[in-house]
Structure formats: C-alpha cells, structure tokens
Image (cartoon, rainbow, N blue to C red):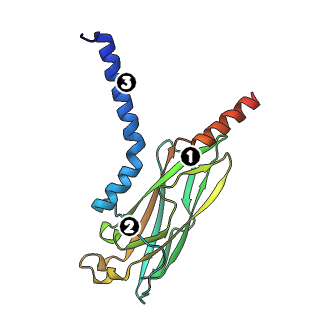
Amino acid sequence: MAMDPKHKTLAQTLSVVVLMGALAWASVPFYDWFCRVTGFGGVTNSADAGSDTILEKTIKIRFDASKERNMPWEFKPLQREMEVRIGETGLAFYEAYNPTDRPIGGSASYNVVPYDAGGFFTKIDCFCFEEQVLQPGERVTMPVSFYVDPAIVDDRDAKYVKVITLGYTFYEIDLPEETASLTQATNKDVN
C-alpha cells in the first residue's frame, strides 16, 4: 500500500526536525570529543593536581571571553593576563552576569591559541562544558586553575611560544527540566 503524498511529505519533514534536534543536542559532547581526539581548537590536557616540576622560565597567559550572538549574559575575564612560571599552578577568574528578568542556562566551550601550545596547557579545574543557570540579576565568579606543562620547553614547535591565550565562548542552552518547571510555576502564580 503506497503512502499518500501529503503524509509522505509530513513524515519526511518530521524526520528532518527530529534529526536536527538530535544533532543540536549532541553538538556539545561531540565537539568536546572531536577536540580531544583531533587536537582541534587547541585542546588542553586535564589533571587532578598541579605539576610536580616548576621551572624558572615564565610564560604569559591571556584570557579572552566571548558570547554566542544571542546570548544575553555579560561575560568577561576578571584579569586580562598573568605571567606564571612554567609548571606553576595559575588561578584565573571569569565573571558572568544575567541582566534579564528570566533565568538563563548557559554552557561554555574553550580554545587555546596558539594550537601548538594547546597540548601543554593543563586545566585542573574549569567551568567549560558545564551547565550554568543564572537567575535574573545573578552574577557569578567562575575559577579556572591550570598550569603549563614543563614539557613545552622540549617541544620542537611549542618551545618558542611566549604567550598562550585561553578563550571561552558562552552560548545559551535550554534550562534543566526542574528549573524550567519551577519558572513556569512561578510565572503562573504571578499571572
């Protein structure tokens, strides 16, 4: 039995919508996995603690912040740059502020430039790829602890790097179910 052309078109359209929704939902974990596997975007290393070796040589770390086009938050690093000894644990802070009258969820992706240095930039603690929900008027300070692996001084290309830039981009995400439900309930009580 052949499908009616109208039903066939509807089924194809719904399939495309479901596929696009699934791709959008999977984009953050897929991007994170892709960067870790390929080294794209100056992917960093992760560690539970600082380096055992600290060199006398220093390196400058710059901090950058940006937002997706329609992200209403204000987002910035609290310091533009710092100089650390290679292997020394550094601690930097970023600030996010929700100036709107509604809760907004966000998540940040990162990149490290130059790419040669990405594999030597080691994050101990970071807010990237974590869901953040800011209530109306809420301001938060988010720490990033890191070190530059001393092995950078022996790398053929990276040993010439004098400045590393760590950049974060925040983008809006759907609110978690419990936050969205609470917001809807609050809005009904007000109306």
The first of marks 3 and 1 along the sequence is 3
Dividing the picture into quadrants, the one containing residue 4 is top left
Residue type at numbered disc 2? Thr
Q: Considering depth in this image, is 149 or 71 the residue closer to the camera? A: 149
The first of marks 2 and 3 along the sequence is 3
* CA distance for labels 2 and 1: 25 Å
Question: As drawn, is 122 to the left or to the right of 2?
Answer: right
Q: Secondary structure at mark 1?
A: strand
Which residue in the protein does label 2 denote?
Answer: 44
Vertical relation: 179 (above or below) 159? above
* CA distance for labels 2 and 3: 39 Å
Seen at 38% across and 67% down, the residue is 44
Residue type at numbered disc 1? Gly
Residue 99 in the image, given as x and y percentages of width and height: 64, 46
* CA distance for labels 3 and 1: 27 Å
Which residue in the protein does label 3 denote?
Answer: 14
Quarter of the image with the N terminus in it: top left
Seen at 44% across and 86% down, the residue is 52
Residue 150 in the image, given as x and y percentages of width and height: 37, 83
Residue type at numbered disc 3? Leu
The first of marks 2 and 1 along the sequence is 2
Q: Secondary structure at mark 3?
A: helix
Task: Please identify the residue farthest to the front as the structure is shown.
Answer: 1
Between disc 2 and disc 3, the foreground one is 3
Packing grade of label 2 (10 A; few <14, some 14-19, many >=20) is many
Which residue in the protein does label 1 denote?
Answer: 105
